[in-house]
Amino acid sequence: MSTPPTRWFKALRGDRLEEPCMKTHLLECMELLKRARAAFQAGRAFDESFRRVQLEALVRMLVEHECDFVDALGRDLHKTTTLDECLVVCEPLGVVLIVGAWCSPVQLCLVPMVGAIAAGNCVILNPSECSSHTSELLHHLIPSYLDNECYHVTLAGVNDLTEIVDLKFDHVFFTGNREDGGRVAQAAAHTLTPVTLVLGGGKNPCYVDQQCDITTTARRITWARFHNAGQSMVAPDYVLCHAEAKAQLLQALRCCLLQFYGSNPQESRSFGRIVNLENLHRTTDLLRRSGKVAVGGQVNEADKYIAPTILSDVIDSDPIMQQEVFGPVLPILTVNSIDEAISFISRREKPLCVYAYSSNSKVISRLMSETSSGSFCSNDSVLQSLMVVLPFGGVGASGMGSYHGHYSFDTFSHRKSCLLRNTCIECVTYLRYPPYEEHNLSLMTWASSLSQKSQGWCQIL
């Protein structure tokens, strides 16, 4: 075991540290962060047995150095330590702001709102201005059905969000793009307001293995990517296709598009339209500057229509791989192995979803364990985000926090630690009172060991 830096002992003695130590601390922290991140990426802390060993070592440290800790606490705070049982009570946070996204405006507004209401909060709901008709309907209907004092709807635009967040809510729940989410988080930080962010910050990859049912795979990917004209935060954003399966997959995708939407998707009642011209122009520009159009590519600005489009020969540096795409465009990239696919996904920002299609369970297991994302689904797409028994949310660039089912209740609740005591066991608890003699300390140590063994009676209300 390495010897702690000398300045630690100086700090323990209460010596005043020199100013250059501040820079030393920063450099040391940078080095420690680098080492820790390398260890994490190598999977060092993933193994369950490793975690158990570390926890046992932590307990051993406390036992073996009990006197040292008692001495240090005495020097710092003249403090002794007592352990007790606890009761956890969930209480509402207060008044929460829920900001919905336009791509699924009813679901992304009302699902988190259900959790907030169930947890006992008052809610101010702010639907997206882009889906104006749905927002107006929510604004009209909610006051007619819900309590007018506890639940409100506002129609503020995205440019007003930071000023609204500055008003100090007890929690902010935001669904949307990364740029707007970042501004919301910054505004919330000024008032120490906790946030839940569900963001389209990373592009959702979809790996197609050479060992898979190509027909079923193509059908499920086509449905997931082109439903709602591709305007979904959980749709596959691009396909990483094994080279041996590429030709078959392209042909199967063509057949699925024809089956789903006919020879002219613009006339299909099952195919949607782009939410506004701004998004249409942005998506059109990206698809025209990336890869090669294998299927589709037609645009009708007056109808806000982009045909379901498949791009082949796409490379990582193409514009469509650098930005979020809320439109019916599916880029296909080629990889030669599962290792190449995992490496490609891991180099990019952490996505909201990772999808994998393979009949090889080892391939599925590797993609699930060796990539990081908000959610994972094998041999299908989107469905994991609809199951209320699973938490849904992002990680890293795709957000923080989660919701759905009881996870929504947890998100909008504060878990308050409570200690409920009576006076009937004062004959034992008197040991905590000074003066602290050696005999009392021995009895307290024994009582603490009994307390650790009886943790099972704790319960959550």
Image (cartoon, rainbow, N blue to C red):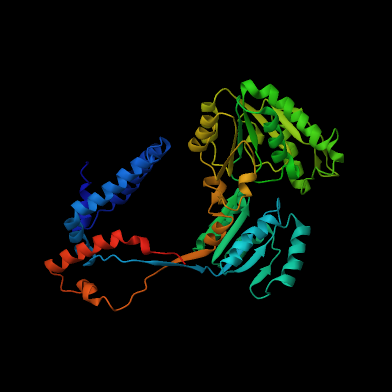
At 23% from the left edge and 53% from the top edge, which residue is drawn? 62
Q: In this rendered view, identify the residue nearer to me: 424 or 117.
A: 424
Which residue extends farthest bottom? 423
Residue at 63% x, 73% y: name it: 150
Residue 229 is left or right of residue 437, and the answer is right
- Where is residue 253? Give x, y as percent: 73, 30
Counting every numbered tag in the picture gives 0
The quadrant holding residue 309 is: top right
Foreground: 81 or 456?
456
Residue 398 position (above or below residue 363):
below
Q: Position of residue 450 (x, y in %)?
A: 25, 62
Up/down of 51 relative to 453, above or below: above
Residue 100 at least partly seen: no
Task: Give the residue displayed 34% in from the left and 41% down from the top.
Answer: 50
- At a point 80% along the width and 42% down the height, the residue shown is 271
Residue 366 coordinates in the image, percent (x, y): 50, 33
Looking at the image, residue 150 lies above or below residue 381: below
Q: Pick whichever, 182 or 436, lies toward us.
A: 436
Question: Can you name the residue that lies furthest to the left here?
Answer: 438
User: Split into 4 quadrants, where in the image is the N terminus?
Assistant: top left
- Which of these two is toward me, 13 or 250? 250
Whether residue 196 appears in this view of the structure is: yes
Q: Quadrant of residue 280?
A: top right
